[in-house]
Amino acid sequence: MTEPDPIADTRRWLERAVIGLNLCPFAKAVTVKDQVRFVLSDATTPEALLAQLGEELVLLRDTDPEQIDTTLIVHPDVLRDFLDYNDFLGEADALVEALELEGILQVASFHPDYHFADSDPDDVENCTNRSPYPTLHLLREDSVSKAVAAFPDPDVIVERNIATLRALGAEGWRKLLAD
């Protein structure tokens, strides 16, 4: 049996689910241009992850968007429990504020057990935010604004994603990500 490769698994999820199912119509362009930075965190505590998040936020802030437009921090060894992960997101947002990056960068969230507050944990539409490992997604506000402005009707994305995932079903989701 081969060792898990969190970055390869995350790339496969990005290609097959996020881009393949068009869950995020903005992901393909930055992926094809190789502007996505993948970081495998070795953090084993929330404090270590928060420190690494700060480093990555500053790096993204200081790097030309043509080189790195977005960053995925994959952290397989910390915050495996979704509720702990969800609580950590408040600390992540506080760090963005402390670094004076509000309106410049934001942190989006993906987790293997992600579920929206108004949904049942087994609802397939939760898969829109389910990744193979806990992952923090650092986004540039300017890039998000440009992408949304260029999309004919961004409000339709959520509805379309729910319909896509319901049609695919839980078994289809599992098959999509299987080797």
Image (cartoon, grey):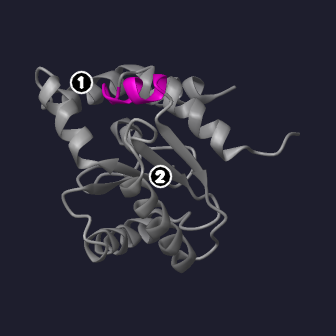
Q: Where on the picture, by quarter, is residue 145?
A: top left
Q: Earlier in the sequence, mark 1 or mark 2?
A: 2
Element assignment for label 1 = helix
Q: Residue at x 40, y 71 (%)?
A: 88
Q: Residue at x 31, y 68 (%)?
A: 96
In space, the residues marked 1 and 2 are separated at their CA atoms by 21 Å
Q: What number of labels is visible?
A: 2
Q: Is residue 119 left or right of residue 103?
A: right
Q: Is residue 14 left or right of residue 45?
A: left
Q: Is residue 31 left or right of residue 75?
A: left
Element assignment for label 2 = loop
Q: Marks 2 and 1: in contact by CB < 8 Å?
A: no
Crowd class of label 1 (few under 14; some 14 to 19; many from 20; radius 10 Å):
few
The spot of residue 107 in percent (x, y) is: 34, 57
> Is residue 133 located in the magenta-colored stretch of the structure?
no
- Taking the image as drawn, is residue 134 in sight? yes
Q: Which residues are magenta?
A: 23-33
Q: Residue at x 88, y 39 (%)?
A: 1
At label 1, which amino acid type do we have? Arg
At label 2, which amino acid type do we have? His
Quadrant of the snapshot with the C terminus: top right
Q: Residue at x 43, y 24 (%)?
A: 19
The spot of residue 18 in percent (x, y) is: 42, 30
**Residue furthest right as drawn:** 1
For disc 2, the marked residue is 111
For disc 1, the marked residue is 160
Q: Where on the picture, by quarter, is residue 126?
A: top left
Whether 62 is drawn above or below 139: the answer is below
- Taking the image as drawn, is residue 120 in sight? no
The spot of residue 95 in percent (x, y) is: 34, 73
